[in-house]
Image (cartoon, grey):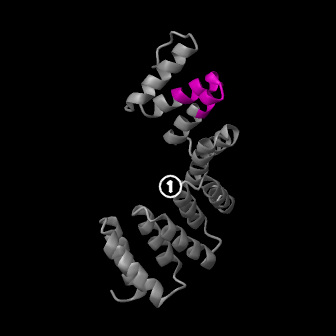
Amino acid sequence: MNSPAGLLALAALHRERQDFDQAERMLRHIVRLDPDDVEAWRLLGQVCHEQADFNEAHRSVSRAIELDPTRADLYRDLGLICLDAGLVDDALDNLQQAVHLSPTDDQLHYSLGLVLLQYGNLIGARLRFQQAIRLRADFVEAWQNLAITCQQQGDMESALVCFRQVYALRRDWPEAGANLHRVLRLLGRREDAA
């Protein structure tokens, strides 16, 4: 288990167990032994992110990107770090790059939609949520956020369609029925949510 791959697997196990200090120590050892280990840099960035050490997380994932700039998952990770650090512009840039590198990844479109929504770009957010749904029709969270976006745009009919889809997919969500009833009420309709 002293091979770099074995150490990386052990560090990942420590991370899963939320033993972040041990995971970080092991990962720092790995990147000292092999400064070109992309996975070790990525995992180190994730561990630092989970500990809210955004500067170190950013530095580590940026190093992984320097080593392999073709991986969408690295740009996604960096985008999420930037988002949590309050660097919305940087989050947006990195998530756009991730989508560019992996245009069929529904999660990337969804994540970019969330950033655009937070940024106030309702048209961009709507397009990204729609693309996530095109890629995975049962993506409940994308339907939910698309409904919210449509509602914020004043497009209540589209919001209604989306909230109906959320309700159809997740009747067990208490907010699914509540949101559907609220939009029906706003539209002056007495239809039953079912």
Q: Specify the principal SS of the magenta part.
A: helix
Q: Amino acid at mark 1?
A: Asp
Q: Which quadrant: the C terminus?
A: top left
On the image, the x and y values in percent for residue 176 come to 44, 29
Q: Which quadrant: the N terminus?
A: bottom left
Crowding near the residue tagged with mark 1, few <14, some 14–19, many ≥20 C-alpha atoms within 10 Å: some
> To which quarter of the image does residue 71 belong?
bottom right
Asked if residue 140 is positioned above or below residue 85 in the image, the reply reads above
Q: Residue at x 39, y 63 (%)?
A: 51
Asked if residue 131 is positioned above or below residue 43 in the image, the reply reads above
On the image, the x and y values in percent for residue 119 come to 63, 44
On the image, the x and y values in percent for residue 82 come to 56, 59
Q: Which secondary structure lies at badge 1?
A: helix
Residue 135 appearing in the image? no
Q: How many marks?
A: 1
On the image, the x and y values in percent for residue 88 come to 60, 53
Q: Residue at x 50, y 41 (%)?
A: 141
Residue 179 placement, left or right of 71? left
Residue occupied by mark 1: 84
Is residue 54 magenta-colored? no
Identify the magenta region.
149-164
Is residue 151 magenta-colored? yes
Residue 42 placement, left or right of 93? left
Residue placed most toward the observer, 75 or 132: 75
Q: Residue at x 46, y 34 (%)?
A: 169
Asked if residue 18 is positioned above or below residue 137 in the image, the reply reads below
Residue 1 appearing in the image? yes
